[in-house]
Image: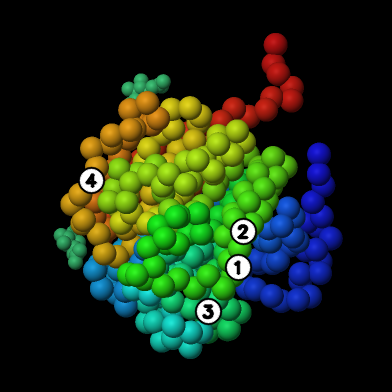
């Protein structure tokens, strides 16, 4: 069993003042940067998950933000996860792009949302200056912001593995007449994907967290507009199934949905409804009958909350009015050290 030196670097971290909110860069393990995020004192944690949002408040983005603030307060959230497509239509043009403040800082204004945000890049973010969103300069403008390509957040109770899924998708490399992508950070696609898969697999194998969560921009399974992502079904899904991952959370399809994997305990959770939605082209779920069970699908705007403790996970989806549309609970056995006779 690998021993990851959290404690050692925590001391170092307090001197570095890298980030606020008690977050700090811990170490690099299996090629992935790891951050430590403490759980609440009672051993529980909660967070919101939002995707596909930055449109300067338009398409109900502001309404979703308002309800996130209310739910965030009620659940006393620890942080927010963004599943990517942070800025439309073409990411940020540079670190100085006003869209950063107009679509993020000035939209998610409520007290409960003044927490750490953990973000990844979506395909639209790759259409602009992808490196700009990763820049430490943005954290100076708004210290909630942390966006990296792939990384791990260790929140003791749960470990969250953020995976950069855009480079997996063939279409972005073959169809280059409609859009251009900023591949500066992906000099060799094949090597990038192979290394990333190996890093994620190793990190998952070594994880002893009670809850294992993987976050990517693209859906593995979806009945929304884009549907399943075949490249992820082929390359990423087997790793998640083999390592008892509890949840795969994504955006990309502008909807909310919950699909259960038939082959493992994995739950596919789409939260990609941060602004423009209502595509009205739900697929009929073909191909899902043997592979998964669709528990919930909503075509409109909204977001998701996650509440975790050592024995229970509760997932809820909300619309623009703050109504709970779908709620789902999973339980885990506590390890009994002194079984009663
Ligand atoms: C905003 O949300 C309401 C309620 O779901 C919906 O009727 C309306 O179409 C949405 N507006 C846009 C622009 O999507
Ligand atoms: C898979 O899910 C479908 C529902 O979509 C269900 O009818 C079927 O029995 C499941 N198959 C297995 C092998 O669990």
Residue pointed to by mark 1:
187
Q: Quadrant of residue 140?
A: bottom right
Disc 4 element: loop
The mark tally for this picture is: 4
**Residue drawn at (37%, 63%) of the image:** 175
The front one of 330 and 214 is 214
Residue 9 horizontal side relative to residue 130, left or right? right
Q: Where on the picture, by quarter, is residue 201?
A: top right
What residue sits right under mark 2 in the picture?
192
Q: Quadrant of ligand 2?
A: top left
- The image shows residue 174, relative to residue 204, as above or below, that is below
The disc, 2 or 3, on the residue closer to the chain's N-terminal end is 3
- Quadrant including the N terminus: top right
- Residue at x 55% of width, y 36% of height: 238
Task: Give the distance between the C-alpha atoms of the residues marked 1 and 2, in whole angstroms.
Answer: 8 Å
Q: Residues within 10 Å of mark 4 (few under 14, many from 20)?
A: some
- Indicate which disc, 1 or 2, sits on the residue closer to the N terminus: 1
Q: Position of residue 143 (x, y in %)?
A: 56, 77
Q: Earlier in the sequence, mark 1 or mark 4?
A: 1
Decide which of 269, 13 is in the foreground and name it. 269
Around disc 2, counting alpha carbons within 10 Å, would you say few (fewer than 14), some (14 to 19), or many (20 or more)? some
Camera-nearest label, 1 or 4: 1
Q: Earlier in the sequence, mark 1 or mark 3?
A: 3
Of badges 2 and 3, the one in the foreground is: 2
Q: Secondary structure at mark 2?
A: helix
Residue at 34% across / 70% down in the picture? 177
Q: How is colour applied across the structure in the image?
A: rainbow
Q: In terms of image quadrants, where is residue 21?
A: bottom right
| Residue, disc 4 | 282
User: Which residue position holds label 3?
Assistant: 132
């Amino acid at each position: 069993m690998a021993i990851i030196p959290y404690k050692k670097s925590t001391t170092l971290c307090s001197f570095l003042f890298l980030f606020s909110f008690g977050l700090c860069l811990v170490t690099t393990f299996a090629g992935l940067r790891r951050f430590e995020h403490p759980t609440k004192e009672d051993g529980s944690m909660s967070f919101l998950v939002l995707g596909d949002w930055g449109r300067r408040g338009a398409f109900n983005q502001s309404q979703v933000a308002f309800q996130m603030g209310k739910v965030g307060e009620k659940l006393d959230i620890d942080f927010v996860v963004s599943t990517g497509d942070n800025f439309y239509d073409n990411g940020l043009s540079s670190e100085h792009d006003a869209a950063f403040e107009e679509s993020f800082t000035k939209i998610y204004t409520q007290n409960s949302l003044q927490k750490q945000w953990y973000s990844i890049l979506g395909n639209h973010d790759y259409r602009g200056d992808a490196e700009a969103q990763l820049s430490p300069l943005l954290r100076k403008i708004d210290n909630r912001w942390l966006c990296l390509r792939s990384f791990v957040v260790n929140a003791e109770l749960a470990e969250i593995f953020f995976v950069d899924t855009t480079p997996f998708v063939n279409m972005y490399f073959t169809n280059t007449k409609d859009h251009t992508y900023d591949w500066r950070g992906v000099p060799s696609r094949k090597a990038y994907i192979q290394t990333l898969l190996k890093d994620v697999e190793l990190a998952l194998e070594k994880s002893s967290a009670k809850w294992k969560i993987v976050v990517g921009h693209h859906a593995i399974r979806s009945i929304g507009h884009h549907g399943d992502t075949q490249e992820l079904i082929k390359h990423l899904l087997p790793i998640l199934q083999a390592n008892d991952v509890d949840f795969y959370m994504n955006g990309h399809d502008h909807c909310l949905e919950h699909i259960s994997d038939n082959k493992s305990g994995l739950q596919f959770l789409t939260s990609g409804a941060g602004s423009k939605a209502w595509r009205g082209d739900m697929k009929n779920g073909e191909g899902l009958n043997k592979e998964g069970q669709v528990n919930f699908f909503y075509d409109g705007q909204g977001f998701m909350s996650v509440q975790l403790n050592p024995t229970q996970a509760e997932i809820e989806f909300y619309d623009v009015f703050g109504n709970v549309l779908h709620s789902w609970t999973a339980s885990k056995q506590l390890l009994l050290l002194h079984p009663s006779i």
